[in-house]
Image (tube, rainbow, N blue to C red):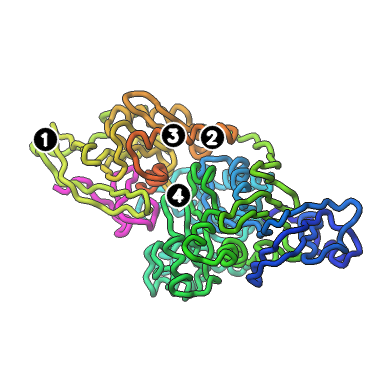
Amino acid sequence: MNRQHTKRRELIDVAMGRKPADTLVRGGKLVNVMTSEIYSADIAIKGDRIAAIGDVKRCRGSRTDIIDANKAYLVPGLIEPHVHFYHGCLNVTNYTRAILNHGVTTVADGFNTVGIIAGVKGIRFMIEEFKRTPVKLIFAVSIAAYLQNRRLGIPPAPNSVRLEDLFQMLDWPETHALEEPAFHLVTEKEKPFLDLFEKAIKKRMSIHGHAYAISIPELNAYVAAGAVSDHESTDVLDAIEKARVGLKVLMRQGSGAYDVKELSKALTEHHLSSRGFSFCVDMAAPEKIFYEGDINEAIRVAMRAGVNPVTAIQMGTLNAAESFGQHLEIGSIAPGRIADVLFVKDLRDFDIVRVIANGETVVKDGKCLTVPKPPHYPDFMYGTIRLKRPVVPDDFHLRASREKTYVKARIIAADGISLYTPERIVRLKVVSGIVQSDPEKDILRISMIDRHAATGQIGNAFVTGFRLAKGAIASSVSVLCQNIVVVGTNNDDMAIAVNHLSKVGGGHVVVADGKILAELELPLLGLLSDAPLDQVVEKSSKVYQEIKKLGCPFTSPLTSLAFCCACDEIGKIKLFQGGLIDAEKGKRVSVILE
């Protein structure tokens, strides 16, 4: 983490009443996550740390700033233990501004996609931008930035993080953890990664894992090797098995994955202790960040599912801090901790009226008061969409024998709820050797275009679930591939969408009848916007509105589109620039079966 300026020894005289506090918070109801109590208590703050709680009259001086809590609940700043911030399309400055409004004062991220496209220098830039904001960063070295889809035989992006970079980043002062090492690295005993685990543990860092579809023997081996958390449970019984062996279960409430309601049953029906559970968003699309919330929304969902309010708050604060070994710094309102305090009017609604971060008020009545200017972005972050040539409509054809009139085809099935995409087998018409989509039956074309090395590779397939009546949607954000992916009812609109993204340097675009209906440009690495926050909000909202008008029922259609693409362990049938791959079997499969 960063921004720890007040020395603990400076707190002693304030706590004893010998010297005045800088700030007193009075008239609030303290939510004590260590004792599961709510009681009246005041808070004395010196610099960026808490000096005392309870009766703190002795800490008041003539220049002490007095904040009247007006009977609000005083809640620790929320902790986001696993997120890929890029999915919100915002640069770091605007992202932190948005999440502060939701009470998130600490974030753990490894910037995996930045590392895929721009390597270590891109990751380093993200860290430095975070340091300019009020949000504290727990940097976790991302295994995925190196690994990508290597296990599936898909070549990595040319400028991505190298294996030796992972070891070097462990020595950075900002590093506190490893992020998302796949469990097969342990069970298959891949020496470089076991060495990485051992180095991290020797440095007292935590290993935050990725245990999708893990078996019981594999689970035991994974935890034995040092993994401390997982965010991939969607079924309560799976979550219980993980909690029992000591994994902190991060109950995900993100975009395209809504797991808190189901996993809360571990507490409400199976009566497990909440100590083994926390929350995360993993992926949060712009609409979620702007309007729905982050960990605060996960807390609300858990409470609606029957979890006690104080317990839910513990899960979003202290439990998350403990998983990183940071509970003496963050996660509670107590002496010596960094002064991150939320003023919550009503616990059930979890409506935040004020946010103190690092001892300073940063949000009041829904307005962010601390708005640092974004840095100057270097040239290497622009111009990262590299196509061999503009695409043409014929590039999206899938061909079969001209003698055939129908073929059986394997297609991707998306549902907008899960990141898992099973396969379906359908019968498709063939005209002059070209396999036809069938929009009336919700069978659309989907394609991925290499944008890293200008190879001209295009993987073509079919998908169901998006229900577009017309037009096309394209994005340069596609999880571990980070290529351009496009879905559409016709090749002409698909080509227009892809070429437009190439022209503007990346982003999201919606096209119908040859016209661009909405777009959000993401020129920073093809992932992030460099525009002011209000412009991003307006353009992103327009994109989502137009996608909905085309007929798509998904809450987060761009997340669903991104997870139609290859992302290592998450199955089943996925798209990459060479076609389809069965992620569970780790092998390429054909679209046409006969």
Question: Counting residues from the N terminus, which is met first, the one under dot 4 or under dot 2?
Answer: 4
Q: Is 517 on the left-hand or right-hand side of 80? A: left
Q: Residues within 10 Å of mark 2 (few under 14, many from 20)?
A: many
Of badges 3 and 1, the one in the foreground is: 3
Numbered label attached to residue 536: 2
Determine which quarter of the picture holds residue 492: top left
Residues at marks 2 and 3, CA–CA distance in whole angstroms: 10 Å
Q: Name the residue located 47 percent from the left edge and 62 percent from the top edge.
A: 305
Judging depth in this view, the residue of 287 and 503 nearest the camera is 287
Of residues 354 and 241, which is closer to you in this image?
A: 354
Q: Secondary structure at mark 4?
A: loop
* Mark 1: amino acid: Arg
Q: Specify start and end residues of the magenta stretch as a single range.
A: 566-594
Q: Are marks 4 and 2 in contact (CB under 8 Å)?
A: no
Q: Position of residue 421 (x, y in %)?
A: 32, 52
The reply to whether discs 2 and 3 touch (Cβ–Cβ < 8 Å) is no
Q: Secondary structure at mark 3?
A: helix
Furthest residue toward left: 403
Q: Amino acid at mark 3?
A: Val
Nearer the N terminus, badge 2 or badge 3? 2
Label 4: which residue? Answer: 255
Q: Earlier in the sequence, mark 3 or mark 1?
A: 1
State the separation of the CA atoms marked 3 and 1. Answer: 39 Å
Name the N-terminal-most of marks 1 and 2: 1
Residue under pointer 3? 543
Residue labelled with disc 1:
402
| Residue 452 sits inside the magenta stretch | no
Q: Is residue 352 above or below residue 529?
A: below
Q: Three-letter amino acid code at disc 4?
A: Ser
Query: Looking at the figure, which quarter contains the N terminus?
Result: bottom right
* C-alpha gap between disc 4 and disc 3: 16 Å
Counting residues from the start of the chain, the first of labels 4 and 3 encountered is 4
